Amino acid sequence: MKAVTSIRLGSTLRALGLAAVLSASSAGAAIVWDLNPQNQDNVTLGTSQTFTEQGFTITARGYDDSDRNGVGTPTNLYFKNRPPDNGANESGLGLANSPHHEVNGSATGTLNFIQLDLRSIISQGATGFQIAVTSLQPNESFQLFGSNFEGVLGTAISGPYTGLEFDDKFVAVTDLGSFTFLSIAGFGEGSNVLPSRFSAEITPIPEVGTVMPIVGLLVAVGATHLLRRRRAAAAGV
C-alpha cells in the first residue's frame, strides 16, 4: 500500500505542478501600444520612436514616398492631438512635414507612410495583431502593407478601410503572415490619417516570482509526505 500511495502522490504532485505552471504561462494577454501615449500635440519627433508596454517594445518610423515607388526616405514623426473634426478623432502619430501632419494618400499612390517594426514582439511569439487609425472623415481611407524590409512599403495585405465606421476602431491584421514590418498609408486622393493604437497578443514566459511559490508548495507537500512515511516506519506501521 505504501508504494501505491507514494506513486499516486507522485502523480498528483506532477499533475499539480504542470497545471500550475501552465496556468501561470499559457494565458495570452492583449497588449495595446498607444502611439501618442500622453496625448501630446505639436510635438516633432525624430525619424523613429519606440513604444514600450509591459516590457514589450515596437518601433515606429516615418517615411516620405513622393515618387510613389514604395521605397521610403526617412522623415520626422509627429505627435498630434486636436479636437474631433467632422466626427473623427484627431489624435495619434503623424508626420512632421506632411499636409495636416498626417499620413497622406493620393490618386496615384502613397505620398508617405508610417512603418511599425514588429520584429521584437514577433520573435517573442506575438499573434493577433490589430491596428486603430484616426482622422477617418467620410470618404477618407487607409490601407495596410506587410514588408520584410525597413523603409519599404511592402505588399498590400488588407484594406482599404473607409470613413467614420473605422475611425479609431481596431481592425485585425489578418494577413501579416511572415512579414515583420507593418506599413500604414493613406489610400486615395485627400485621405489624411493618423495611426493611433496597435495591439497584439503575447503569452509571457513565467517570471521567477510567479513560479517559485508553486515550486515551494510542491516541495512542502513532498516534504510532509516524506516525514509521515519516516514516522510510520519508525513506529513499525
Image: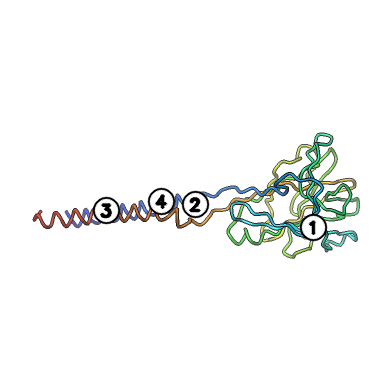
Separation (CA) of disc 3 from disc 2: 25 Å
Q: Is residue 64 rendered to the left or right of residue 146?
A: right
Secondary structure state at the residue bearing disc 2: loop
Left or right, 40 with reference to 7: right
The one nearer the camera, 22 or 55, is 55
Q: Which residue bears the numbered disc 2?
A: 26
Is label 1 in a helix, a strand or a loop? strand
Q: In this rendering, is residue 26 above or below 85? A: below
Q: Position of residue 157 (x, y in %)?
A: 74, 54
Q: Nearer the viewer, mark 4 or mark 3?
A: 4
Residue position marked by numbered label 3 in the rendering: 9
Tag 1: Cα neighbours inside 10 Å, few (<14), some, or many (≥20)?
many
Amino acid type at image mark 2: Ser
Which of the marked residues, 1 or 3, is nearer the chain's N terminus? 3
Q: Position of residue 81 (x, y in %)?
A: 78, 43
Q: How is the image coloured?
A: rainbow
Which percent across, then down, holds residue 137?
Answer: 83, 39
Q: Amino acid at mark 4?
A: Ala
Residue at (34%, 55%) from the top-left corner? Answer: 14
